[in-house]
């Protein structure tokens, strides 16, 4: 999917050394032309990294490496990962074109699903409701309906988990059917890990190794 560019001047350069750990979902409470115009207006002092339109377009307004101004006001937060500092520095903001309620069109849902997958893979963001959140979890007073009661949380998380690959962090995490080949390759120093006991072996890689061992390709 193509990501269109419509960059905003409303951002802070860099992220103050913070790592991106979560995606914050929003609704625009208005249509795309007005949203783009407002979020690219310096008077607004607001922006988001992305806008997903009702017809399925993905528009980037702020580079991922910079801090968008989308969730900086914190009021009675319920977000478990809030660390007491400005959430903008360690989150990505996605706006969804919507006049209220958070009910997405089907093509809009498919576009935001694709965008979430893209960002999750790029920044190694865990797939759960601590890392895929709504604005209301940061500001429960001023943004109680952002992104709205109809936003498809359950469907989104389920679809994201469907594509989430299992990572075996240590040798002990490896299932019994994969342990013999992993031990062999660890003994040979072919798999060396990070020196702290972590091998971070993707399941797809493990399956390939088991198959190659079975076919006697590996010696």
Image (cartoon, helix red, strand yellow):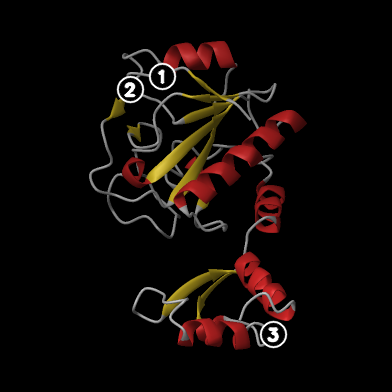
Q: Is residue 172 above or below residue 90?
A: below
Q: Is residue 133 visible?
A: no
Rendered location of residue 4, percent (x, y):
54, 21
Q: Looking at the image, do the residues carrying marks 2 and 3 touch, with CB atoms under 8 Å apart?
A: no
- Measured in 3D between alpha carbons, the distance from the residue under mark 2 to the one under mark 3, in whole angstroms, is 52 Å
Who comes first in sequence, dot 2 or dot 3?
2
Secondary-structure class at tag 1: loop
Residue 184: mark: none
In the picture provided, is 145 more to the left or to the right than 73? right
Residue depicted at x 58% and y 38%: 115
Residue drawn at (69%, 39%) of the image: 150
Which residue: 61% across, 81% down?
A: 219
Image position of 83 with respect to 101: above or below: below
**Within the image, what quadrant is residue 209 found in?**
bottom right
Residue where numbered disc 1 is placed: 7
Q: Which residue is mark 2?
A: 10
């Amino acid at each position: 999917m193509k990501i269109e560019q419509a960059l905003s001047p409303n951002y802070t350069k860099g992220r103050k050394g913070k790592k991106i750990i979560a995606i914050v979902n929003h609704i625009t409470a208005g249509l795309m032309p007005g949203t783009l115009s407002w979020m690219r207006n310096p008077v607004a002092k607001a922006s988001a990294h992305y806008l997903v339109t009702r017809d399925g377009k993905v528009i980037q307004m702020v580079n991922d490496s910079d801090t968008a101004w989308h969730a900086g006001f914190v009021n009675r937060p319920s977000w478990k990962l809030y660390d007491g500092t400005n959430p903008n520095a360690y989150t990505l903001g996605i706006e969804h074109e919507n006049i209220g309620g958070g009910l997405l069109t089907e093509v809009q849902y498919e576009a935001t699903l694709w965008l979430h997958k893209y960002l999750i893979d790029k920044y190694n963001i865990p797939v759960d409701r601590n890392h895929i959140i709504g604005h209301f979890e940061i500001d429960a007073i001023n943004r109680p309906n952002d992104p709205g009661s109809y936003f498809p949380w359950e469907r989104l998380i389920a679809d994201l988990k469907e594509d989430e690959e299992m990572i075996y962090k240590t040798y002990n995490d490896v299932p019994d059917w994969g342990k013999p080949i992993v031990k062999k390759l660890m003994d040979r120093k072919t798999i060396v890990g990070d020196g702290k006991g972590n091998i971070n072996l993707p399941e797809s890689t493990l399956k390939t190794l088991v198959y190659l061992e079975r076919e006697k390709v590996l010696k």
